[in-house]
Image (spheres, helix red, strand yellow):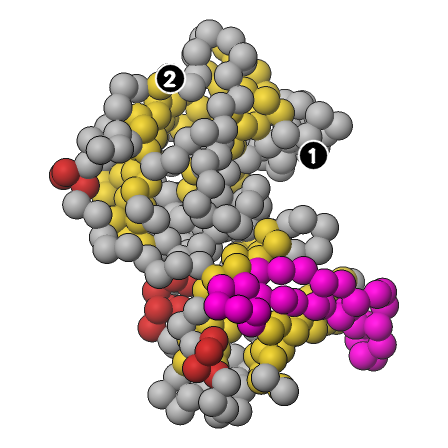
Amino acid sequence: MKLIPFLKTAGLGALLAAGILNCVAAGACCDSAAFAGSRWALTIPGGGIGWLGLTQKPDGKLDALLLWSGGHPRPAPVALKDGALVVTREFKRGDKTFSDVITAKIEGKDMLALTVRHLDDTGAEIRKTETFSGRRIPDLPPRPDLAKVKFGAPVRLIGDTLDNWVVMNPKAYNGWTLKDGVLSNNVVQPDGTKKHGTNLRTRAADFEDFRISFEVNMPPKSNSGVYLRGIYEVQMADTHDQPPGYLNMGALYGRIAPGAAVEKAPGEWQTVETTLVDRHITVVLNGTTIIDNQPVLGCTGGALTSDEFVPGPIYLQGDHSDAHYRNMIVRPVVKE
């Protein structure tokens, strides 16, 4: 995803867990307990993905992190009103500030019924109120013992043809090519201009937990990503010589920052090994473990779905930058 200079040195997952992201908070209310510590997978208007995480501070007030389609989770003002949760998403278009006012009520035990009102900078509604839904994300399981996990036979994803791959936007410029075992995306034109490219996914969409290894070569100032099951993005980017940050090379985009800066210079081949088991992720970059079996709190921006319990494809981000991949191999977890 495109780099954004925001909280670069800390993982949002850690900040959420620690409850140190202070937003405009709700007044203390008994209803806050119903939302405290909860995480919600959202299907936003139009079918896109969203995510909402809530923490309760010692004084009973709530903090919120909101992911809306793309980008990464951001602090959002939150309040309680008439038994409902009200979260405000603010964003700019040009020199104007707009707001989406999201109201959420719990239905049953695990569902959210939500509405969103779209307001301009004067507070006037600019289009009709929309409804959408959310589902409570179950608590994370214990950290898996990876030494006891069994992996199956290797599945080679980059072969001699592109038969294993499908472009995700047939109407966009397709810069993906395969030559001598290297899967390349080239959207930068000879004159230096860029075309808006397409992401690429595996034809197989039945991956669950697995270990994936590959080599990647990122040109200067380039940006890509590898989406695990189409849900979680491991960031691929030229962030050489930058301190570790949750938008940097090898990060779980917007959620978990690398523990060390071991990225090579742009234009050099780098090795990546990522293990996803029981909603915990490990990333090894150039032989160094930079994310060590850490819990994943939810989907990342650009995911195909916010449902973390469905199988999915591997997909490569290719909409705005060049990138080169080779020797990509998946080994599925063997269920016993």
Q: Which residue is mark 2?
A: 156
Quarter of the picture holding the N terminus: top right
Can residue 87 be seen?
no
Q: Quadrant of residue 166?
A: top right
Amino acid, disc 1: His
Amino acid, disc 2: Arg
Q: Does 282 sit above or below residue 101? A: above
Q: Is residue 31 left or right of residue 294?
A: right
Q: Residue at x 30, y 26 (%)?
A: 331
Magenta: main secondary structure: strand
Q: Residue at x 25, y 49 (%)?
A: 293
Q: Is residue 222 left or right of residue 57?
A: right
Q: Residues within 10 Å of mark 1 (few under 14, many from 20)?
A: some
Q: Is residue 281 left or right of residue 171?
A: left
Q: Does 47 sit above or below residue 131? A: above
Tell us which disc is closer to us: 2 or 1: 2
- Return the residue nearer the eye: 129 or 248: 129
The x, y position of residue 249, in whole percent, is 40, 43
Q: Is residue 154 left or right of residue 304?
A: left
Closer to the N terminus: mark 2 or mark 1? 2
Q: Residue at x 67, y 49 (%)?
A: 47
Q: Does 325 sit above or below residue 247? A: above
Q: Which residue is mark 1?
A: 196
The x, y position of residue 313, in whole percent, is 49, 31
Q: Is residue 117 magenta?
A: yes
- Magenta-colored span: 106-134
The x, y position of residue 74, in whole percent, is 53, 66
- Return the residue nearer the eye: 220 or 331: 331
- Return the residue nearer the eye: 186 or 326: 326
Quarter of the picture holding the C terminus: top left
